[in-house]
Structure formats: C-alpha cells, structure tokens
Amino acid sequence: MTEVLQLAKDLIARPSVTPEDAGCQALIADRLGKAGFSCEHLRFGEVDNLWATHGRGGPVLVLLGHTDVVPPGPVEAWSSDPFMPEVRDGVLYGRGAADMKSGVAAFVVALERFVAAHPGHPGTVALLLTSDEEGAAIDGVRRVAQLFRERGQRIDWCITGEPSSQAKLGDLLRVGRRGSLSATLTVRGVQGHVAYPEKARNPIHHALPALAELAAKSWDGGYETFPPTSLQVSDIHAGTGANNVIPGSMEVLFNLRYNPHWTAPRLEAEIEALFERHGLDFALSWHRSGEPFFTPEGPLRSAARDVLAAFAGTAPEESTGGGTSDARFIAPLGAQCIEIGPVNASIHKVDEHVRVADLEALPALYLALIERLLLQGHLVGAIPENRSHGANPG
C-alpha cells in the first residue's frame, strides 16, 4: 500500500464531522513535525486549525484544506461503513474520500517529499487546515485569516485541494470563485380574516411584485471567465396553515452568487432600494459568506496550467464556476489563489469515493507545483508587484 493511500485511509477512519477534527490534525502535525515543519495549533471555539510552515521569508506558498466532512446520512445506505475506508476495484470509498481527505493526504506527502529533497529551499511552504469548512465557516479559515491580518502574515500563493476535476484528474483549474450573499427578508402585514381584506394587509400580495422584479432582474453579463450574477429564492413562508387567515408577516430566503462586478454592500443597497420603491414594510438580514476572487494570468496560473497539462495530457479548462471555498478568506490577504484536486462527482453523496490511481498521482502533481513555484519561480523573481486580487475591480 502506498503512503498516500495509507494516510488517506487513516484520515477517513476518523469520523471528523464538522466541527470535529477527530485527531486528523494531530496525526498530520506529528508527521510534518518529524519532517522539520513548525506546527501551530489554532483552536477557536469548537474548531481546530493547523498552521504548519517550513522555510522562511518569501515567496510564501500555502496549501489549504480541511479535515472536516459532512454527515454520512444513514449508514445502511452505504455499500460499506462510511468511516471504515475500503478499496474495491481500484476505488477508495469512505466519507471524505474526495472531499477532501485525499487532497489533504496528498498535500502532506508532497510536502514531506519537497523538504526532504530541498531542505534549504527558498521561501516558505505552508499547510493550513481547518475543521470548519463544511459548517458555519466562522472559526475556521475566516478566523485564521483575521489572525494573519493582525500578525501581518504574508501569503503570495495559495493552492486549495478541493475536488475540482470533472471527468479525470487535472482537467479543470479553478482560478476564482463567485461571492455568496444570503438574505432573510421579512415583510410585515396585518393579520385578518380573508372575508374582510379591507381590515388586513396581506404581505404576500404586497411582496409578490417586488419579488417578481427581483427574480427577473439581469444583474450583469458576466466578468472575465465568471458567469453572470444570479439570484435564487430558496424559501418562502407565511401564514398559520389555515386557508381563511390573512398572514401577518412573510419570510423569504434568497441567495446571490455574484462576480467581481459587484460587492456585497452594493448588492445590499440595490436590493433594499428595490423593496423601498415598492413601498414594502420590510426588514432585511444579510449574511456575507465571502466576496468573489479572481487570479489573473501570472506565475501561479501559468505554473498550474503547465503542470496539469502534463498530468492530464491536455490543457485544463480554466474556470470560476462552482460554489465557495475557504480560498475566499485567503484571497483578501493579497494572495493569488487556485484550486486543484480530485474528481468531484461523488462529493457529499452516499458511497463517496476517489480512484486510487488519481490519489496516488496527486502527491507528484502537488510536488511539481511546489517545485515550480518556490524553486524556478523564485529564481526568476516571479512575484508580481500588485499581489492583491481579493479586492473587487469595480
């Protein structure tokens, strides 16, 4: 059994359902400590975070991942116990096999190989792990990024090991992510009997024209490789359940996935103005999950494209699609961020899995990227003057 397969199995066997880490980070810290890394455990609330570094100065390359997993659901729905990793027909099964304990295991093995081969390497290579990526994401990388900002911790490049490949390993390079903004809208009315509408005010009737305009709104035409900004209403609730009562209030949940044309404050202001224009008596509660980020053409994107093309046999698709990742908290620190990982077809599903051949190829892929950036990149002075791409261009 290869070392990366063994480590992946050891991690999957730990039931680290958010926010539990279940000993994953202690196992990793022990290994990296023996390899010469300085390891700092950062616990905030119920969340464990690990910051492991080797080397000093810049450039600073961070490998970013998470040890937590989503709940497995009914165990009987699985072909085998989700926390008893099993290899069948060249495929490793278990919760977290794809998202993202295989990526974490490959990170660790790649880092061990890198410092063994280049103990006096230029710059700093680091691993940042959290147990709060699948949950509220409050005390995980978001909180660590706040600490880094206070410390003045520099990060030049960040590689997230989220499962990003589509059909085969290396066929997609994620170079950015949309922002995510959620809202809870409360529309206030006056409860009453349906037979006497003049004595009541129906919040549903008042809100529908505004919601129709909101749902039909074209926000933009896209940005670079980003799709257009979109809004989806995810829940509407009003009333007592009786068909003869006009409700006194209505609650609507909606979410926007937005590109760098927008910032959260601008979107909030535009939507609040729309509801005011319709004369609603309303309240809005916002939750900003993260601003969009985009890594333009440069040394990180170029290195990743070349390495993935060598592994996949063809140049990868370069995408900003998908949901959100913890890179949204690292990009505002001034880091260029990309995401490269195993095939994502089974993530969060019953019988989550990863091909063993892909898992065993990952350490070499990450090692090639680390060497390209810290060895070759350092020698040609590849750090651009404008390092910040977490901010929105307008």
Image (cartoon, rainbow, N blue to C red):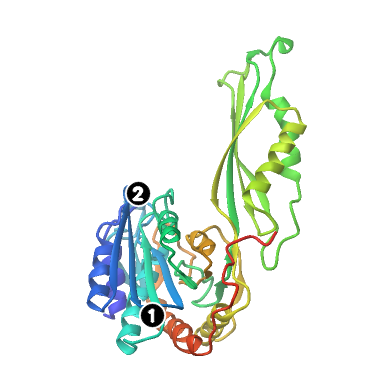
Measuring 70% from the left and 63% from the top, which residue is drawn there? 223
Residue 244: image quadrant is top right
- Quadrant housing the C terminus: bottom right
Residue 13 visible from this viewpoint: no
Measuring 68% from the left and 25% from the top, which residue is drawn there? 281
Q: Is label 1 in a helix, a strand or a loop? A: helix
Question: CB of mark 1 within 8 Å of CB of mark 2?
Answer: no
Residue 314: image quadrant is bottom right
User: Hey, what amino acid is under mark 1?
Assistant: Pro
112 or 87, which lies in front?
112
Question: In this image, 193 relative to 34: left or right?
Answer: right
Which label was assigned to residue 277?
A: none
Residue 276, compared with residue 39, is above or below; it is above
Q: Position of residue 390 (x, y in %)?
A: 57, 63
Q: Residues within 10 Å of mark 1 (few under 14, many from 20)?
A: many
Q: Is label 2 in a helix, a strand or a loop? A: loop
Q: Nearer the viewer, mark 1 or mark 2?
A: 1
Mark-to-mark CA distance, 1 and 2: 32 Å
Residue with the mark numbered 2 = 74
Measuring 43% from the left and 81% from the top, which residue is drawn there? 370
Q: Position of residue 131 (x, y in %)?
A: 35, 56
Callout count: 2
Residue with the mark numbered 1 = 363
